[in-house]
Amino acid sequence: MVAHLTGPAPPRTVRLDFRDLTGVDRLGLAALLMVGRHSSAARAVPHLDSRPPFLERLLRQTNVLGHLTATGAGAE
């Protein structure tokens, strides 16, 4: 992923689909934050699609949602 974000024509958006996600641990949360940092550095807007309710709660409770999305809004 990082290679795509740092290439000659980086994307304007990064879409992550969580439709089949059944769980997330602290390493998964750390990986999401890393995606957010790399996306931000590349000026790409991350979109967290199809977030299951448990992930939505976790992102809000840990105050991570606003770091990963431009608005901290609900699923797109």
Image: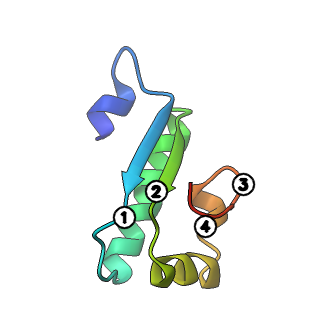
Image coords of residue 54 (percent x, y): 47, 84
Quadrant in the picture for the C terminus: bottom right
Q: CA distance from mark 1 to mark 2?
A: 6 Å
Dot 1 crowding, Cα within 10 Å, few <14, some 14–19, many 20+ = few
Disc number for residue 18: 1
* CB atoms of marks 3 and 2 within 8 Å: no
Real-space Cα separation, disc 3 to disc 2, in angstroms = 14 Å
Q: Which of marks 2 and 3 precedes in the sequence?
A: 2
Q: CA distance from mark 3 to mark 1?
A: 18 Å
Q: Is residue 49 left or right of residue 73?
A: left
Q: Is residue 66 above or below residue 7?
A: below
Q: Secondary structure at mark 4?
A: helix
- Report helix, strand or loop for mark 3: loop
Q: Which residue is denoted by mark 2 in the rendering?
A: 49
Say which quadrant the N terminus sits in: top left
Q: Report the disc number at residue 29.
A: none
Amino acid type, label 3: Thr
N-terminal label among 4 and 2: 2
User: In the structure shown, which secondary structural element does the residue marked by tag 1 occupy?
Assistant: loop
Residue type pointed to by label 4 = Leu
Q: Which residue is mark 4?
A: 65
* Sequence-first disc among 1 and 2: 1
Q: Are marks 1 and 2 in contact (CB under 8 Å)?
A: yes
Q: CA distance from mark 1 to mark 4?
A: 14 Å
Q: Which residue is mark 3?
A: 71
Q: Position of residue 56 (x, y in %)?
A: 54, 76
